[in-house]
Amino acid sequence: MRSPILLASLPLALSQGICALTPCSAVHVLLLRGTNEPYPGLQKPIAEAICKDWDCTWASVEYQAVFNDYCDSVEGGVVNALKAVTEYATRCPGSKIVLSGFSQGGQVVGDLLGGGGGEFKSQNCVQETNEGIAPETFPGDHIAAALVWGSPRHVANQTYNLLVGARMQSGFPREGAQLESLNRWSARYRDYCNADDPACSQGSSWDAHENYGLKYAEDAAQFVRFKACQ
C-alpha cells in the first residue's frame, strides 16, 4: 500500500518540479469526508482496508464539508470530486477509481453520479442542480466502484442498499430523474445505512451514523476488489 495523499490547493509559488505528482496506481480511492470532519475522517479504516496488500493509493478530495452554507458546500464538493476524478483518469488512464463518501460526502458522491440539487428545508437552502456523469463515458468509465455511508439522500428499497436501513427512507430522499440517473450505477454502487442513523434513516443514534468504518470496511474492500478485477 502506498502512502495517502491530499488533494489540496498549493501555493502559486510552488512549481510542478518541486511538488511532483505521485505515480499512478492500479486502484485509486477518493474519499469525501462528512460534515466538519478533519481529513481523512472516519473513512480512513475503509481506505486502508481497500488498499491493503495491492497496488492502491487513496486521497481525500478537498471541499468545505460544513453544515452552515450546506448547499454551497455540497455543490463545491461535487465540482471538486469531478475535477479529481477527471484529472486522475486523464493522467492515469489505466487506473481504476473508487469513490467513498460519508454523510455529507455520501451525498456528494450520489450527486456526482446521479445529479443533485433541490431545496433542503432542514438546512434552509437551495442547492443548484447538476447533471450526473454517465457510467459508460469518460470520466465515469474509469470509476470501478462507489460507496456511500449514512447519506442524507438515501432512498429505501434500492437494489444497492445494505444493512437494516436498506428499507428505510432519509429525510430528503433522491427521487425522479436524479434517482433514475443514479440507478445507472447500480452494479458499481453500494449504499450503507444503519437502522438508527439520523442521516439516512431518520433515526436517533449518532453512534449508528459514525460506526461504518469500524464495522464494514472489510465488506467494502471485498466489493471493491471484485469490481476492480472484473
Image (cartoon, helix red, strand yellow):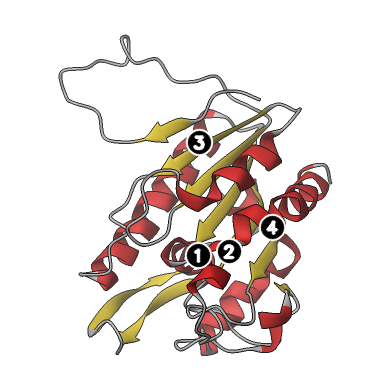
Closest to the camera, between mark 4 and mark 2, is: 4
Judging by the rendered image, the residue that carries numbered circle 4 is 215
Contact between labelled residues 4 and 1, with CB atoms less than 8 Å apart: no
Q: Secondary structure at mark 4?
A: helix
Q: Residue at x 72, y 80 (%)?
A: 164
Q: Which one is earlier in the sequence, the residue at label 2 or at label 3?
A: 3
Q: Secondary structure at mark 3?
A: helix
The residue nearer to you, when weighing 114 against 6, is 6
x then y, percent, for residue 187: 75, 65
Q: Residue furthest top?
A: 17
Judging by the rendered image, the residue that carries numbered circle 1 is 106
Q: Is residue 134 left or right of residue 145?
A: left
| Mark 1 to mark 4 CA distance (whole Å) | 17 Å
| Mark 4 to mark 2 CA distance (whole Å) | 14 Å
Seen in the picture, residue 194 relative to 51 is either above or below; the reply is below
| Amino acid on which the number 2 mark rests in the picture | Val
x then y, percent, for residue 210: 53, 63
Q: Secondary structure at mark 2?
A: strand
| Amino acid on which the number 4 mark rests in the picture | Lys
Q: Quadrant of the N terminus?
A: top right
Judging by the rendered image, the residue that carries numbered circle 3 is 88
Contact between labelled residues 2 and 4, with CB atoms less than 8 Å apart: no
Judging by the rendered image, the residue that carries numbered circle 2 is 148
